[in-house]
Image (spheres, rainbow, N blue to C red):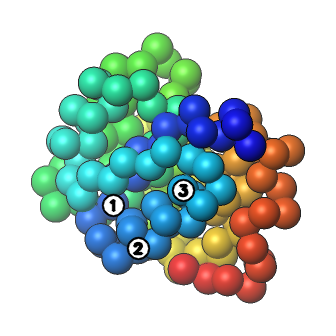
Amino acid sequence: MDTLRHKQILIVEDEEGLARTVKARLETIGYEVQVETEGKPGIRYAAEHRVDLVILDVNLPDINGYEVARELRKLYHPWTLPILMLTVKDKPVDQLRGFAHGADAYITKPFDSAELFQTVALLTGEAATVSGQEGSSADSL
């Protein structure tokens, strides 16, 4: 698990309770996690720190997650920063819009925690390391 300690995840989520829960769960399996509750501070954080993954809500109080994803794509050499959109927007058109703005994965809320943690592991290149450690697939957040 030593390699996980070096993986930095940025969560941009305005629902603070959910963000705290996901942060705590990711930290228990070795990730370093920063939470920002608005898009602009999330972009600033990503610009100032080496981030390995962004978990991004679409509905944010200042700018929407699609715009955040577009700005992150400008900051990081295209496609070097995985972006996972985690949102209540569940229509196919919303998913297509997310992918068009740079998302690598799209999970709708409420979500199965095993799906989230497996997707995080895949996007950070840690799938073999955390497989089976994330808990029951019946655990929804």
What residue is at 81 percent from the left and 45 percent from the top? 129
> Could you say which disc has been placed on residue 49 in the image?
none
Whether residue 131 appears in this view of the structure is yes
**Where does the image place residue 109, in percent across and percent down from the top left?**
50, 74
CA gap, disc 1 to disc 3?
17 Å
Q: Nearer the viewer, residue 122 or 133?
A: 133
Q: Nearer the viewer, residue 130 or 58?
A: 130
60 is higher (above) or lower (below) than 108: above
| Quadrant showing the C terminus | bottom right
Residue depth check, mark 2 versus mark 3: number of the one nearer the observer: 3
Q: Amino acid at mark 3?
A: Glu
Mark 1 touching mark 2, by CB under 8 A?
yes
Q: Amino acid at mark 2?
A: Leu
73 is higher (above) or lower (below) than 43: above
What residue is at 54 percent from the left and 56 percent from the top? 27
What residue is at 27 percent from the left and 65 percent from the top? 14
Q: Nearer the viewer, residue 96 or 35?
A: 35
Residue 62, quarter of the rendered image: bottom left
Mark 1 touching mark 3, by CB under 8 A?
no
Which residue is denoted by mark 2 in the rendering?
A: 18
| Image mark count | 3
Q: Mark 2 falls on what kind of element?
A: helix
Which residue is denoted by mark 1 in the rendering?
A: 13
